[in-house]
Amino acid sequence: MKNSFLSSPKGQSSKAWPALAALTLATSCAQAQNAPPQAPRKMNVLFIAVDDLNTDLGAYGRSDVKSPHIDALAARGLLFSRAYCQQAVCSPSRTSLLTGRYPDTTRIFNLTTHFRDVLPDVVTLPQQFKLHGYTTQSIGKIYHGGLDDPPSWTISSGGQGGGGAERRRNQRRGGRRQQGAMNFAPANFQTIAGETATGETDYTRVPADRKALSWAMPDVPDNALSDGQEAERAIAALGQLQRQPFFLAVGFHKPHLPFVAPKKYFDLYPLASIKLPNNMFPPKGAPPLAFANFGELRGFKDIKEVAPDDAPIPADKARELIRGYRAATSYTDAQIGRVLAELDRLKLRDNTIVVLWGDHGYHLGRNSEWVKHTNFEAATHVPLIISAPGQTTRGQKTNALVEFVDVYPTLCELAGLPLTPGLEGRSLVPLLKNPQAKFKAAALSQYPRGGPRGRINPHMGYTMRTDRYRFTQWIKADDKSVTATELYDHQTDPGETVNVAVRSENQALVAQLAAQLRQSFPALSAPGPLPLLSAPEPRRRNAND
């Protein structure tokens, strides 16, 4: 009997798909021998999150990037070539995916407010699995550092987002990652290493220190760094969970700044081989609100020395940074490979849904920006791969526009779980069955600017990626007036180098897209100011939160 829940027989409910997927070769053999069939098993979930990972991957067409294990996962699953996050910064993006709700609903626009301050009774994605008999466990960074969610987990294993060392560091810093609710220039920066009590270098510790370097290549084994250790913990967890239905969430930290990876991964990328993007300049006609000036990177010592104040990054330093990011990507790719290899060794792959995602994009010099914190394609476009047992579309890709809010209902449907009320995304299962299926007219993202301590009045930048265009409007939070408009034609300008919103021949198109934007974001037509103004102020979280 063929294992293919993604192509259910005529007239059969989709609720039966997980049972079909759970029929293994052993079951088929037993049936062939007239033995009683085995009871269907629940589908496990291996949920892999990667911090600051953009789509510069082999599977996404970048042959200059070494990502063989992510590429292999794509060969066994469906690659979503046009997936988008809801806000290009860690906590709002992760909150959106894990609650299945847009930022205007969660009211999470910063890195310090917990979503339960706004939605105390929301059922998160892992929590829904937990409520339906799964053992749910987090390893590494799933929620943003210091903002773990105990109701989500049967077992919370610590790490950044898991309540461990990173959380304690955050508490020692006073629970603050930012200087104000809507100012997204970080107040603290990480060093490349700490020291043990004996004075030895410890590359797993990252105390706050503005004298840090932006990259480093210690000649150490993989498990000397935190992501190697997270992989080992994930491997151990698979062994412990293998005889029960599980939702195992594994969050890797790199390629987040600083770009630290063992030297052998830097050796994959000779400095002379690094090519710079061809759009390392501000888009012509883009408004000042569109830019973030990459404050997260500017605080590092080596960057301040070569690019003081608002100066651009020199070409030589740009190549160093891109090389460091590539090396950190390949390092994390290797750790993902180790976890997937253990999944295979334990013979769990045929009963486990694997999803891999990066929490937002990363500029790396494109559009004159270097990190995230914008509404440009480089910051909002994300990697997303789903591999499910019985999948008939293995190794294919879909060009459909999809969003992170779609992941929650997708995993519930694949596992046969009911949907919780209030989800704002759509299941991706139709695309897993038919990658060419029509899906969404647009993918939505947003990013705030200004605030109580900022130099400008609060604005929300609402952006919409349609099949052809990226359309963005910067809207004042109090009276909802439009301050600036951006329009980029991806058919002729995929690098978003020229804002064509002001061209006279595009005014009818701008009006059409503006109407579509207002229909897509309910807050724009609701009475009163934008949700940005009613978001909770960031607060210090105590050790028991």
Image: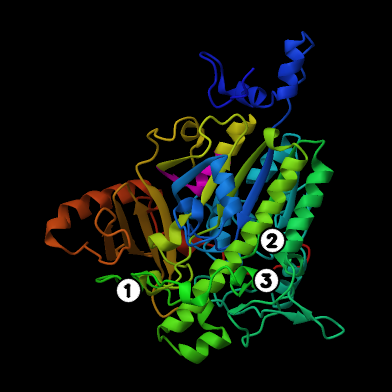
Give the CA separation, mark 3 to mark 1.
Answer: 34 Å
User: Could you say whether the residue bearing mark 2 is in a helix, strand or loop?
Assistant: loop
Q: Work out whether residue 179 can be spotted.
A: yes
Closer to the N terminus: mark 3 or mark 2?
2
**Residue 161: assigned label:** 2
Say which amino acid is labelled 1: Pro
Q: What's the residue type where badge 2 is placed? A: Gly
Secondary element under disc 1, as helix, strand or loop, is loop
Which labelled disc corresponds to residue 262? 3
Lateral position of residue 320 relative to residue 203, left or right:
left
- The percent coordinates of residue 140 (x first, y second) are 71, 59
Q: Position of residue 17 (x, y in %)?
A: 60, 24
Residue 389 magenta-highlighted:
no
- CA neighbours of label 2 inside 10 A, class few (<14), some (14 to 19), many (20+): many
**Residue 13 in the image: above or below residue 147:** above
For the stretch drawn in magenta, the main secondary structure is helix
Q: Amino acid at mark 3?
A: Pro
Give x and y (percent) for residue 51: 59, 62
Location of the C terminus by quadrant is bottom right
What residue is at 64 percent from the left and 76 percent from the top?
217
Q: Nearer the observer, disc 1 or disc 2?
A: 1
Kindly indicate whether the residue at mark 2 contacts the one at mark 1 (C-beta within 8 angstroms).
Answer: no
Q: Nearer the viewer, residue 404 or 289?
A: 404
* Region of the chain picked out in magenta, as a range: 400-409
Closer to the camera: disc 3 or disc 2? 3
Reading the image, the residue beneath label 1 is 282
Residue 40, how many percent across, how many down? 73, 23
Distance between mark 3 and mark 2 Cα atoms? 24 Å
